[in-house]
């Protein structure tokens, strides 16, 4: 799986939980939950979507890695060994 | 005979518009069956029957707006003897089930065939360029109803299971399906909230209490529980909060009540949980018998009800019958929230965000995750002492989460 493919899945999943936003315009180091106004329920749905679409396990202790696009992409690339 | 009335789906609902009958005279119904779709300020709601019987007469025409409490239909209870000749007369005089026979052409067939479809279902199908002649109807006499069209649309789009298979087109298609749930305008929701809250503030003399609760044990329990669960089953603090409120109401039942010129304590603990909408406004679905459900079951309920609340896809029973309300701010926001009681309830519990704070315990100051729980109570119904006992019970339960 290529980096671009992972990014596309991330952006699509964000768009699904926050359809009124433009996740593709997120700053690389911006706090995603604050920028897109995502509550804890939607944040969990986002993690469920990523786990299912990328076929990986994201344990609760790793939730901190999902704060920004930068940290999330680094985490997912490592998980998928890209 | 049972009079089926336009239900009230909360103190802020004054009227509803009958959009579509789902049953016709002569149909047998049981508790939980959907009788009609009604358009309210909270969106298109499926109205359920609470009795068992046979539909005798449908009194409203589709498209008519009536106040809450208006008799919509007459249901004959099972076992009640009615002369057979009465039934056809009721049908022939009213015949409000308007599923019409319309010619429909399939792409291949030259021959026309008759398809039964309700006006609402037909409109949705046409708006989406859907060939409804191929849909199997599940309504009365095989008529195609709204649900059938929605199902067909959902199947036609289908979520892409392939990774990376997301295209602009798929995005558009998902948006199309979402349009199917009639979204009430923001203004209508705001008006409804404004009316209910003004009434509450005008009529209810509130008292307010707050308590700081150390969440160390509760969060440790959640972390431990979640570490053994797949991501789809992981529990959010909100589920634990709801359960602790329900257990505390068992201890202090005076707050699980209604004010009807006197305090009327309710047997069932049905918790209204405020769901905020991204576009502004709130929807308050009701969790029935919350005290009898496990934390895991409450989380399952949240997983189901929150997305449906946000897409205005709820049944009437899911919006009514709450005996108390919880408003939960979640993480990262304000420290505490003082709600306004939702009449005729007598209390609303506000949960702030959990944040680390210095906290003294047994003579030692440490950094603990703290939650501010507030209670707004109706002072006509209870006094501060009752509210104080309730908040102490919340603290007790959250210090012992494994017992919840």
Image: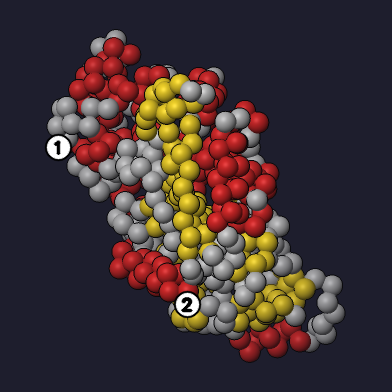
Q: Can residue B107 be seen in this view?
A: no
Asked if A37 appears above or below B233 in the picture, the reply is below
Q: Nearer the viewer, residue A65 or B40?
A: A65
Considering every residue shown, the one lying at the far front of the view is B363
Q: Residue at x 80, y 71 (%)?
A: B78
Quarter of the figure that contains the N terminus of chain B: bottom right
Horizontal and vertical percent position of residue B183? 36, 61
Say whether residue B329 is left or right of residue B56: left
Q: In this view, does B288 lie to the left or right of B376?
A: right
Callout 1: 10 Å neighbours few (<14), some, many (20+)? few
Subunit that carries the residue with mark 2: B
Q: Position of residue A52 (x, y in %)?
A: 41, 26
Q: In this view, does B230 lie above or below B22?
A: above
Residue B74 in view here? yes
Where in the figure is residue B401, as x and y percent of width and height?
59, 30
- Residue B313 against residue B361 in the figure, above or below: below
According to the picture, the residue beneath numbered tag 2 turns out to be B15
Q: Who is closer to the viewer here, B188 or B174?
A: B188
> Please, what secondary structure does the residue beneath circle 1 have?
helix
Q: How far apart are marks 1 and 2 (CA)?
A: 42 Å
Tag 2: Cα neighbours inside 10 Å, few (<14), some, or many (≥20)? many
Q: Residue at x 57, y 82 (%)?
A: B70
Q: Residue placed at 24% from the left, 21% from the top?
A: A71
Residue in front for this viewpoint, B66 or B86: B66
Vertical side of B182 occupied by A38: above or below: above
The disc at residue B335 is none
Q: Residue A25, which numbered label?
A: 1
């Amino acid at each position: 799986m290529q980096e671009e493919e992972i990014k596309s899945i991330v952006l699509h999943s964000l768009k699904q939980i926050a359809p009124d936003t433009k996740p593709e315009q997120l700053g690389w180091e911006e706090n995603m939950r604050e920028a897109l106004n995502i509550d804890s329920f939607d944040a969990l749905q986002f993690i469920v979507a990523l786990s299912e679409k990328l076929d990986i396990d994201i344990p609760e202790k790793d939730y901190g890695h999902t704060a920004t696009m930068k940290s999330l992409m680094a985490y997912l690339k490592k998980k998928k060994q890209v | 005979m049972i009079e089926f009335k336009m239900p009230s789906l909360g103190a802020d609902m004054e009227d509803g518009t009958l959009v579509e009958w789902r049953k016709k005279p002569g149909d047998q119904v049981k508790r939980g069956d959907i009788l009609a779709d009604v358009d309210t300020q909270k969106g298109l709601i499926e109205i359920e029957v609470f009795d068992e019987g046979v539909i005798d007469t449908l009194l409203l025409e589709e498209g008519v707006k009536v106040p809450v409490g208006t008799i919509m239909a007459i249901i004959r209870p099972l076992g009640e003897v009615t002369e057979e000749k009465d039934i056809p007369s009721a049908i022939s005089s009213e015949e409000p089930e308007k599923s019409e026979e319309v010619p429909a052409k399939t792409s291949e067939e030259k021959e026309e065939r008759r398809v039964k479809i309700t006006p609402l279902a037909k409109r949705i199908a046409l708006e989406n360029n859907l060939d409804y002649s191929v849909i199997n109807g599940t309504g009365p006499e095989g008529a195609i109803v709204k649900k059938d069209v929605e199902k067909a649309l959902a199947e036609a789009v289908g979520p892409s299971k392939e990774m990376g298979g997301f295209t602009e087109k798929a995005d558009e298609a998902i948006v199309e399906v979402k349009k199917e749930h009639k979204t009430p305008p923001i203004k209508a929701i705001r008006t409804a909230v404004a009316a209910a809250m003004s009434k509450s503030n005008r009529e209810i003399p509130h008292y307010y209490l707050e308590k700081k609760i150390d969440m160390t044990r509760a969060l440790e329990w959640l972390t431990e529980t979640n570490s053994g669960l797949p991501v789809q089953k992981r529990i959010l603090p909100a589920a634990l909060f709801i359960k602790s409120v329900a257990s505390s109401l068992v201890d202090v039942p005076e707050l699980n009540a209604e004010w009807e010129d006197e305090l009327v304590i309710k047997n069932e603990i049905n918790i209204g949980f405020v769901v905020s909408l991204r576009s502004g406004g709130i929807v308050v679905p009701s969790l029935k018998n919350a005290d009898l459900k496990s934390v895991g079951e409450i989380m399952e309920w949240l997983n189901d009800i929150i997305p449906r609340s946000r897409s205005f896809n709820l049944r009437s029973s899911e919006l009514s019958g709450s005996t108390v309300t919880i408003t939960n701010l979640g993480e990262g926001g304000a420290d505490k929230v003082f709600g306004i009681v939702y009449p005729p309830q007598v209390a609303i519990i506000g949960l702030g965000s959990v944040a680390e704070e210095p906290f003294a315990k047994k003579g030692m100051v440490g950094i603990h995750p703290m939650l501010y729980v507030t209670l707004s109570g109706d002072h006509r119904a209870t006094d501060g002492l009752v509210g104080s006992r309730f908040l102490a019970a919340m603290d007790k339960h959250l210090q012992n989460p494994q017992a919840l």
